[in-house]
Amino acid sequence: MATSSQKLIEIAEYYFRSNQYQLAKEILVKLISTKEANSKCFELLAYIFGNEGDQKEALRHLNIACSYVNASAESHYYHGKELIKIKQFEDAINHLTQSIKIGGEFFEGLFELGLAHANLKNGKNAEIFFKKALSLKPENIDATFNLAKLYAEEFNNNEESIRLHNLIINKEPNYDPSLYNLGELHEKMGQSQK
């Protein structure tokens, strides 16, 4: 049987999905002032603030949501993703890892872990997570592009980088980032052969 707080959260969630953010927020703000507040209350408030463009409040509420023992995989994932945006990569890795522990491996979490590790210059870990992400969605251009970039910048493996950029161009012939990088790589390799 659902508790009164669960029913209120369901109503707030309905309002949220209906883009009636103010009504959802009113319910949740009242609920968090009670002893029945839980991770889901703060998670929903974070999503509302995020949709309203208030990233600072969204991040603050995600932080609170993730402090609960029963925080959801989604709370940790979105918290990690937001932390990447503000360049807090180590904290992002912690939340993204927790998200995968709770919810299992999923493309977005693995991809974001790859990005966080790449930004920290943890090339081997970034490679592992980009490859795991690609094992779930082999056609994904963003993961392929970031892996190609990683091979060129971290491992100086220009041949593998070129191969991956060519895969992208075969899928999407006008993908400018890969076209640009291919030009740079060919120029770099031409100069190294002189």
Image (tube, rainbow, N blue to C red):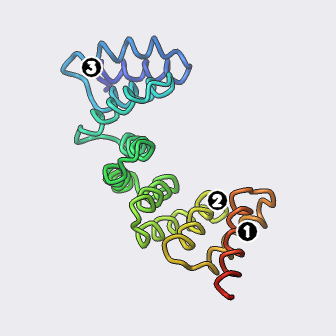
Residue type at mark 3?
Answer: Ile
Which residue in the structure is indicated by mark 2? 140
Which residue in the structure is indicated by mark 1? 183
Viewed as shown, does residue 192 lie left or right of 66? right
Residue type at mark 1?
Answer: Gly
Mark 2 residue element: loop
Q: Residue at x 43, y 16 (%)?
A: 24
Viewed as shown, does residue 9 lie left or right of 130? left
In 3D space, how far apart are the residues under numbered discs 2 and 1 (Cα atoms)? 22 Å
In this rendering, which labeled residue sits more in front, label 2 or label 3?
2
Mark before the other along the chain sequence, 2 or 1: 2
Q: Residue at x 35, y 54 (%)?
A: 93
Q: Residue furthest right?
A: 173
Residue 77 point in image, percent of width and height:
41, 46
Mark before the other along the chain sequence, 3 or 1: 3
Q: Quadrant of residue 78?
A: top left
Residue type at mark 2?
Answer: Asn
Residue 90 point in image, percent of width and height:
32, 54
Q: Badge 3: how crowded within 10 Å, few (<14), some, or many (20+)?
A: some
Mark 3 residue element: helix
Mark 1 residue element: helix
Q: Residue at x 38, y 29 (%)?
A: 56
Q: Residue at x 38, y 11 (%)?
A: 26
In 3D space, how far apart are the residues under numbered discs 3 and 1 (Cα atoms)? 55 Å
Proximity of marks 2 and 3: CB atoms separated by less than 8 Å: no
In this rendering, which labeled residue sits more in front, label 2 or label 1?
1
Viewed as shown, does residue 48 lie left or right of 183? left
Q: Badge 2: how crowded within 10 Å, few (<14), some, or many (20+)?
A: some
